[in-house]
C-alpha cells in the first residue's frame, strides 16, 4: 500500500512538473556548447531495499553514484541530471547487484535544494544459493538533494521492475523498491 501511494505521488509529480519542462526551447547536445558545465558529483549511498518477488525481507543496500548534467539534451526549465549508480543487497541468501542509468529532470525549489524525478534503465544480477541470473530492468524514481559548498546530501526512492526471468525455482524476476540516503562531493 505504501509503495503504491509513493508511486502515485511520483507519477503525479512527473505529470505536473513535465508541463513546465515542455514549454520553451530544448537544447540538444549541450555538451558541444562552450558554456556547458557538467556539475559532477560522486556519492556513497546506503539504504533499504525491499525485494517483492523472492520472499526475502528488506535489508541493507550500499552503493555509489555519479551525477552530472546530461550531455544529450536540456529542457527549457530545470536541468536533466544523469545519475549512474551501482549497488548491492544481500539478505537471506538473496544477492542483488544493480547497475542503473537514471536521467532525472531536476528543479531548484530553494537555494541549493533540488527535487528530481525520472525513469531509468538498468542491469540486475541476482544470486540465490549459487544460481545467478542476469535481468534487464526499468525503474522510476525521485530524489531530493541539498548542496552545502562542495558537499552534497540526498534522499531518494525508486521502484525497479525487472524481466520476468526465473531466478530460482518458483521465483521470477527481481522487482524491488529502494529508499536511500547519499553523501557526496561536487566538483
Image (tube, rainbow, N blue to C red):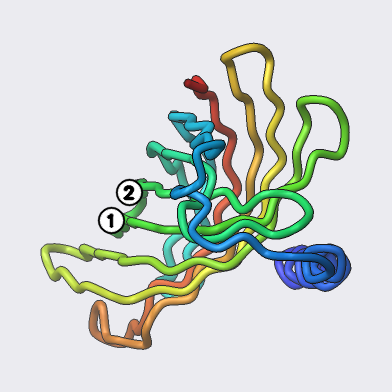
Q: Front-most of 37 and 182?
A: 37
Residue 125 in view, yes or no? yes
Disc 2: which residue? 90
Left or right, 34 with respect to 15, comes to left
Left or right, 25 with respect to 166, comes to right
**Image coords of residue 90 (percent x, y):** 32, 49
Q: Badge 1: how crowded within 10 Å, few (<14), some, or many (20+)?
A: some
Q: Badge 2: how crowded within 10 Å, few (<14), some, or many (20+)?
A: some
Residue drawn 75% across and 50% down?
Answer: 78
- Would you place residue 113 above or below residue 101 in this image? above
**Image coords of residue 156 (percent x, y):** 63, 45
**Image coords of residue 24 (percent x, y):** 81, 66
Q: Earlier in the sequence, mark 2 or mark 1?
A: 2
Residue 1 in view, yes or no? no
Q: Front-most of 44 and 96?
A: 44
**Image coords of residue 20 (percent x, y):** 86, 64
Amino acid at each position: 500500500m505504501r509503495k503504491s501511494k509513493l508511486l502515485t505521488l511520483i507519477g503525479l509529480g512527473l505529470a505536473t512538473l513535465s508541463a513546465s519542462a515542455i514549454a520553451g526551447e530544448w537544447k540538444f547536445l549541450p555538451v558541444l556548447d562552450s558554456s556547458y558545465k557538467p556539475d559532477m558529483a560522486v556519492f556513497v549511498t546506503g539504504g533499504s531495499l525491499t525485494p517483492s518477488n523472492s520472499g526475502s525481507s528488506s535489508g541493507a543496500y550500499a552503493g555509489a553514484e555519479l551525477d552530472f548534467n546530461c550531455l544529450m539534451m536540456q529542457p527549457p526549465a530545470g536541468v536533466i541530471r544523469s545519475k549512474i549508480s551501482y549497488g548491492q543487497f544481500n539478505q537471506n541468501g538473496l544477492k542483488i547487484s544493480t547497475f542503473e542509468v537514471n536521467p532525472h529532470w531536476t528543479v531548484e525549489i530553494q537555494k541549493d535544494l533540488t527535487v528530481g524525478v525520472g525513469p531509468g534503465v538498468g542491469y540486475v544480477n541476482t544470486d540465490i544459493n549459487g544460481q545467478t541470473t542476469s535481468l534487464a530492468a526499468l525503474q522510476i524514481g525521485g530524489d531530493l538533494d541539498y548542496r552545502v559548498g562542495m558537499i552534497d546530501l540526498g534522499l531518494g526512492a525508486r521502484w525497479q521492475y525487472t524481466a520476468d526471468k526465473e531466478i530460482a525455482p518458483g521465483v521470477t524476476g527481481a522487482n524491488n523498491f529502494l529508499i536511500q540516503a547519499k553523501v557526496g562531493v561536487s566538483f
